[in-house]
Amino acid sequence: KMENLKLQINDLSVAYTPEKLAVKHVTTGILERTITAIMGPSGCGKSTLLRAINRMHELYPDIRVTGEILLDERNIFKMNPMEVRRMAGMVFQRPNPFPTMSIYDNVLAGYKLNGIRLSKAQKDEIVETSLTSVGLWGEVRDSLFRKGGFLSGGQQQRLCIARAIALKPEVLLMDEPTSALDPISTSKIEELCMELKGKYTIVIVTHNMQQALRIADTTAFFLLGDMVEVGATDQLFSMPRDKRTEDYITGRFG
């Protein structure tokens, strides 16, 4: 069947200062229900690109964005930002459950932020479904009204993923979601990503090449704001078309 484009990025540039583009004229398509890894050294524009997809960059006053990002063929820059953030959930580098809130309220935080009213039955159902889909329900079902601080780092990150998918997004954006975790928690999150791509389109920023190789269908290599190369992951790693990609993945770099 014809594979569906979930996101189309057209000539996207993001500038923090007028003379310095953090992301330079990026054009690429992202297929539905795939995992796309955005890889590259620190400070090369990976996170900036990710944040543009759900308009997080607008929380900083002086950023200028040109070009367009289409989500299901709708230009997100012409949509209500709240709607964009519901459709594209974000998971950050450090697990950041809201420390003063119970596990239950953490899962529902997106609804509260968006002013969406739910019945008790709806809340219970969303909490159970979201925690089940990240593999946490069995571990926390008896502690739903405790604050999330007693959870391990890996469990906290899964709680943050549950919070993102509670809103039933189309796209999951993950900014180095395992860089603060130990190897076992990391592999659990990677397995979870592989499961979740059955339902969601996942874009993951990573500086871990092995992680991209293990889980990504498509990998894009970024360098100083430029998307140097994008392609099927195995092809990009085994036969990169650009010398800079080859230098990066073989470690002859920097």
Image: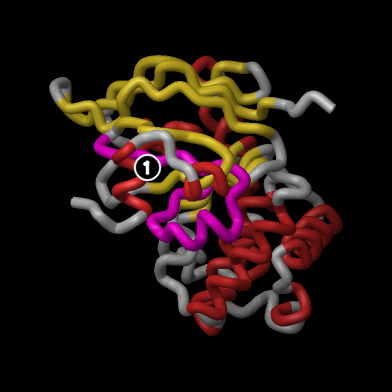
Q: Residue at x 25, y 46 (%)?
A: 43
| Dot 1 alpha-carbon crowd within 10 angstroms: few under 14, some 14 to 19, many 20 or more | many
Residue 143 picture quarter: bottom right
Residue most toward the left? 19
Q: Nearer the viewer, residue 216 or 104?
A: 216
Give the x, y percent position of residue 39: 41, 47
Task: Answer left or right for 193 relative to 141.
Answer: left
Residue segment shown in magenta = 204-224
* Quarter of the rendering occupied by the N terminus: top right
Q: In this view, does 116 lie above or below 31?
A: below
Q: Which of 62 and 177 is in front in this view?
A: 177
Q: Residue at x 48, y 62 (%)?
A: 210
- Give the residue type that dot 1 points to: Lys
Q: Which residue is drawn at 34% across and 56% down?
A: 250
Q: Residue at x 80, y 60 (%)?
A: 129
Give the x, y percent position of residue 128: 79, 65
Residue 211 lies in the magenta stretch: yes
The residue indicated by pointer 1 is: 46
